[in-house]
Amino acid sequence: MPENRFPVFHRFLAPVAMLLVMAVTVSVAQADGREHLLEDERNTVEVFERFGPSVVAVSVTVRGERVDPFEGVPEDLVPPQFREFFRGMPQPRQQQPRQGAGSGFVIDDEGHIVTNYHVIRGALEDGGVSLRSGAEVTVIFPGGDPIDAEVVGANALYDLALLRPVDSGVLPDDARPLTLADSDQVLVGQKSIAIGNPFGLQSTVTSGIVSAIGRDLPGVGQVEIPMIQTDAAINPGNSGGPLLNSRGEVIGVNTAIVPGGGLGGRPGFIGVGFAVPSNLLGTSLDEMRDGGLTDVSSRARLGIQVIGLQGYPDGLRRTLGLPSSGVMVVAVEEGGPAEEAGLRGAEFRAQAGELTLPAGGDVILSVDGEEVSDASGLQRLVFAREAGATVTLQVWREGETREVDVELREVPRPEGRPGR
């Protein structure tokens, strides 16, 4: 039938169809008793109901030791019943176990559970993922009982760990795997939803926005991580839980509040929380599933320390004749790949107002053709390669650009110094 045969009829049908759709929507809202909720509220409720069952409480116990998980937290910030939840009732003549708590979430159909490495670190033997003598790791699904879990693998670089219930048949039917979003597409101001177990309060949901992206937070992981900052409430016990977008996809792994116990030394929510981006989790999953611990000592490196030129004032860059972008080599580790390839570290320091910055060193512009703009970018490009791989660096030196081939290898890290 030609589309224009009954134009009046078509014009009549369009608004009628729209009214029908609206009527169905209203009736559904009334049917589930949520007609009083705003659209954003309904979204939060639906995300929590759909994906909350996949978020677990992670409990770590090491017998023979006693450590207060709220050590350093002022008494008035934590009600006594919360402290007792973690400590357990005192038992005369018995040394209480060391206990810790965090969160985690199901990531695949095999029942693997993601959490933070720092949540389970105290239960592990040094340098691996085997449980120490007397150590236990358990996970608790909402409304369920504790389930023994093993640590499959961990990535100390990004503060991530992968658990698995010892009995794979104990997972609840509604514990569906969460989906990873592309964290490179996360925008400041978009909605963020955190689900976890702060202070042992199981299945707690908080919401807010993404406050910033690309934040460098010293003390989280072993390398610089471009953290996602959120104002969704993150408290002790949230560590390892998911930070979700409005579709219920994981944009990050909730990891920390401000290190050192918050501004002024008081641990707790102060409007600033941080999450490891989901893309770093995505690149780490296969390696963690394979088992073992990934840390700086197991990664091939260049053997250098660097600083991004974006921190140099424009006037200083012009005075020194530096490129507009790249990373300055501050120091070259003795006997490392970079030294053997002839890279040079900074030879002096330059003053710019109150800033004192290294100068006179090589500037790395790209790795295998991929431009480098900051230290974390160089780090990610290098760590993505295996020992024995050769990378071609484009290097600026004294006004000239050259290519330098460097064979990566594992380099023991000098104590207290993050290297690349």
Image (cartoon, rainbow, N blue to C red):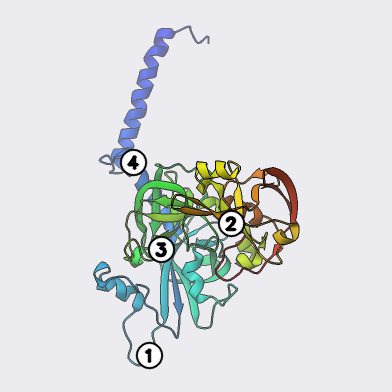
CA–CA distance in space, label 3 to label 2: 32 Å
Residue tagged 1:
94
**In terms of sequence position, does the residue under pointer 4 or pointer 3 come before the other?**
4
Tell me, yes or no, if residue 199 can be seen here: yes
Instruction: Tell me the kind of residue under disc 3.
Output: Pro
Q: Secondary structure at mark 3?
A: loop
Which mark is drawn over residue 40? Answer: 4
Residue tagged 2:
348
**In terms of sequence position, does the residue under pointer 3 or pointer 2 come before the other?**
3
Q: Is residue 9 shown left or right of residue 328?
A: left
CA–CA distance in space, label 3 to label 1: 33 Å
**In terms of sequence position, does the residue under pointer 2 or pointer 4 come before the other?**
4
Q: Position of residue 163 (x, y in %)?
A: 53, 66
Q: Secondary structure at mark 1?
A: loop
Residue tagged 3:
259
Camera-nearest residue between 291 and 51: 291
Camera-nearest residue between 218 and 132: 218
Marks 4 and 3 close (CB-CB < 8 Å): no
Neighbour class for label 4 at 10 Å: few (<14), some, many (≥20)?
A: few
Name the quarter where the C terminus is drawn. bottom right
CA–CA distance in space, label 4 to label 3: 31 Å
Instruction: Tell me the kind of residue under disc 2.
Output: Phe
Question: Is the residue 10 above or below the residue 200 in the image?
Answer: above
Q: Position of residue 94 (x, y in %)?
A: 38, 90
Question: Is the residue 338 above or below the residue 371 in the image?
Answer: below
CA–CA distance in space, label 4 to label 1: 51 Å
